[in-house]
Image: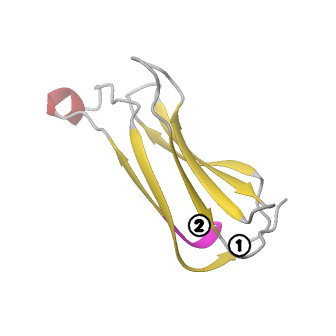
Amino acid sequence: PDIHGITCYLARAKTGGISGAVGIAENKTEASLSCLKIGPITQSGPLPRQQDIAKIRASLFFKKLHLVRMIDPAHSVVIYLTYSDELIEGSPKNSISAVPLGVPIQLK
């Protein structure tokens, strides 16, 4: 909502069955992210260089999937990154998407 003209699409694994329905299942730390420029870029005010803009619960108590926005002012690019804050099995799967703006962005 701080940058208008960009839309992100996030796909993630979600456990089904009874444990998934009642929210006690451990979902995998896998996600796919795609962000696109869909219109003119405007912003609601100066932005931090990096900001955690969303947290999605991936287990009943602890694990969350984070969506982070980073600004590269030198190249006029916004970068979005997903990651999990808790490793359950194996390595966490991160996903990244970069959106060229074509206009300067105001930073805090």
At mark 1, the secondary structure is loop
Q: Residue at x 66, y 71 (%)?
A: 101
Q: Quadrant of residue 13?
A: top left
Is 72 positioned to the left or the right of 84 in the image?
right
- Residue 83 higher or lower than 40, as above or below: above
Query: Does residue 6 show up magenta in the picture?
Result: yes
| Residue placed most toward the observer, 103 or 55 | 103
With 57 as the anchor, is 2 left or right in this view? right
- Quadrant of image for the C terminus: bottom right
Furthest toward the top, the residue is 89
The residue lying toward the viewer, choosing from 97 and 27, is 97
* Location of residue 89 in the rendering, given as x and y in whole percent from the top left corner: 39, 17
Q: Which residue is mark 2?
A: 1
Q: How many marks?
A: 2
Residue 51 spot, x, y in % from top left: 69, 49
Amino acid at circle 2? Pro
Colour pattern of the rendering: secondary structure
Circle 1 residues within 10 Å: few <14, some 14–19, many ≥20: few
Q: Which residues are magenta?
A: 1-7
- The chief SS type of the magenta part is strand
Q: What residue do we see at 50% from left, 37% from top?
A: 94
Which mark is first along the chain, 2 or 1? 2
Residue 57 tag number: none
- Label 1, on which residue? 44
- Please state which amino acid type lies under the numbered disc 1: Ser
Are the residues at dot 1 and dot 2 in contact (C-beta closer than 8 Å)?
Answer: yes
Secondary element type, mark 2? loop
